[in-house]
Image (cartoon, grey):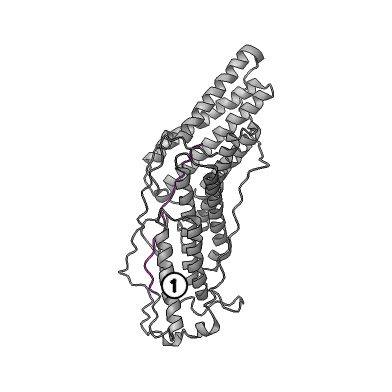
């Protein structure tokens, strides 16, 4: 099963020096600021490094986040926040709203924004891996796991950290509930695509495949609904993707449900189910064309040319023809006018996000270390405040062209 996934751009950020002249009063505190600067720069580099793997990403992210925690949490594990939480201004762009950045003088904003990019990296890594030729079973499992990890990170940010922001997210920004919910559900839906491909490869019962496809279509519909009240100018392309995947997996569900009905000698109903599959496949095909023509964040591709798409078209056509032949020779059943109701529930294979937690503060953070930051010596003009002329440069992402006709299978 060839996979193709829509991806929004990575978030971009302004450089952060972590230089606090006058405030830092000792070599150990200077060293931790230097480590923050270098570990942040290293993590940002890895986002666009094609040789980066999940282990490298986890190590680099943990290294930076454990140091950043000293700017957020008190060292005695009480609910009190660190005195350094508001010392630094951070600027980040959003995945949908171009290069217009948001800025907050809050280390929690930095933790969430960088965490968001880590989750995006996992989705992009999964997409690259799924687009490879001759993907192995282990690589398919890695795609599946990476998408579940990404869902877990997005979920953790939404539930545990975004509510702590002093300044709530603006409408249409990444940290707003509707957007982050769409990201969570999309990751779950895409991971289930891998499950479906595996079930087809292992020739599992058509009833199970139909149920999984139906649940996946519902996921895509929910993600699309989460974005429905956003400005079409920046959400239209993403929504086309979610809608076409919803139609695509609804077609899958009707196709495999038809096979189940045929196996139960309900040939007339099977034909009607396959006709419905044909209808949803045609809708998905039309949406593929619209997706390619819609401007907005995301890749410019023609999904209908991908093998993952064409294979379903052939399957629906061949299965429908088989049902019609059987009905003409054996069953002679009337084809219902109403399509069968899909009330399918999958008992296996449903994807849940992998639980995520940020690492605890680095062992370098001690009461003595915190005391070496003297906030009474901050300059009067407060150089940490944002400079209007600062420009946030977009992230130069590697140009990965999806495979067209390789027939890469998730097996």
Q: Is residue 33 left or right of residue 325?
A: left
* Of 97 and 253, the residue lying toward us: 253
Q: Residue at x 60, y 37 (%)?
A: 199
Residue 377 drawn at (x, y percent): 42, 87
Residue 307 drawn at (x, y percent): 45, 34
* Of 179 and 43, the residue lying toward us: 43
Vertical relation: 260 (above or below) 287: above
Mark 1: secondary structure: helix
Bounds of the magenta segment: 1-17
Q: Which residue is mark 1?
A: 36
Q: Is residue 309 left or right of residue 163?
A: left
Residue 202 in view here: yes
Vertical relation: 199 (above or below) 175: above
Residue 65 drawn at (x, y percent): 50, 68
Q: Tell me the quarter of the image containing the C terminus.
A: top right
Q: Residue at x 49, y 75 (%)?
A: 85
Instruction: Decide whether residue 196 is among the magenta residues.
Output: no
Please tell me whether the stretch drawn in magenta is mainly helix, strand or loop: loop
């Amino acid at each position: 099963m060839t996979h193709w996934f829509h991806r929004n751009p990575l978030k971009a950020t302004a450089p952060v020096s972590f230089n606090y002249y006058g405030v830092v009063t000792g070599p150990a505190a200077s060293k931790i600021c230097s480590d923050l600067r270098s570990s942040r720069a290293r993590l940002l580099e890895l986002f666009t490094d094609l040789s980066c793997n999940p282990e490298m990403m986890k190590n680099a992210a943990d290294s930076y986040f454990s140091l950043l925690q000293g700017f957020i949490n008190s060292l005695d594990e009480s609910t009190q926040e660190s005195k350094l939480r508001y010392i630094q201004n951070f600027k980040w762009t959003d995945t949908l709203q171009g290069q217009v950045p948001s800025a907050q003088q809050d280390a929690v904003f930095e933790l969430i924004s960088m965490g968001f990019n880590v989750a995006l990296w996992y989705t992009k890594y999964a997409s690259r891996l799924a687009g490879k030729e001759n993907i192995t079973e282990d690589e398919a499992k890695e795609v599946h796991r990476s998408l579940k990890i990404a869902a877990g990170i997005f979920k953790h940010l939404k539930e545990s950290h975004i509510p702590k922001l002093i300044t709530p997210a603006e409408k249409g920004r990444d940290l707003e509930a509707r957007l982050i919910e769409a990201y969570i559900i999309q990751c779950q839906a895409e991971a289930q695509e891998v499950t479906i491909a595996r079930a087809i490869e292992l020739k599992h019962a058509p009833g199970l495949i139909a149920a999984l496809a139906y649940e996946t279509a519902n996921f895509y519909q929910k993600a699309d609904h989460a974005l429905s009240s956003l400005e079409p100018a920046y959400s239209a392309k993403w929504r086309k993707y979610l809608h076409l995947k919803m139609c695509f997996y609804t077609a899958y569900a009707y196709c495999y449900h038809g096979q189940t009905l045929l196996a139960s000698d309900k040939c007339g109903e099977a034909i009607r189910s396959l006709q419905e599959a044909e209808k949803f496949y045609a809708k998905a095909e039309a949406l593929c064309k619209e997706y390619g023509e819609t401007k907005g964040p995301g890749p410019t591709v023609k999904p209908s040319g991908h093998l993952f798409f064409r294979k379903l078209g052939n399957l629906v056509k061949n299965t429908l023809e088989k049902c019609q032949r059987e009905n003409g020779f054996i069953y002679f059943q009337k084809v219902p006018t109403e399509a069968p109701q899909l009330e399918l529930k999958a008992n296996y294979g449903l994807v849940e996000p992998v639980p995520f937690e940020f690492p605890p503060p680095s062992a370098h953070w001690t009461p003595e270390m915190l005391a070496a930051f003297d906030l009474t010596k901050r300059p009067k003009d407060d150089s940490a405040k944002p400079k209007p002329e600062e420009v946030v440069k977009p992230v130069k992402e590697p140009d990965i062209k999806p495979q067209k006709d390789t027939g890469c299978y998730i097996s």
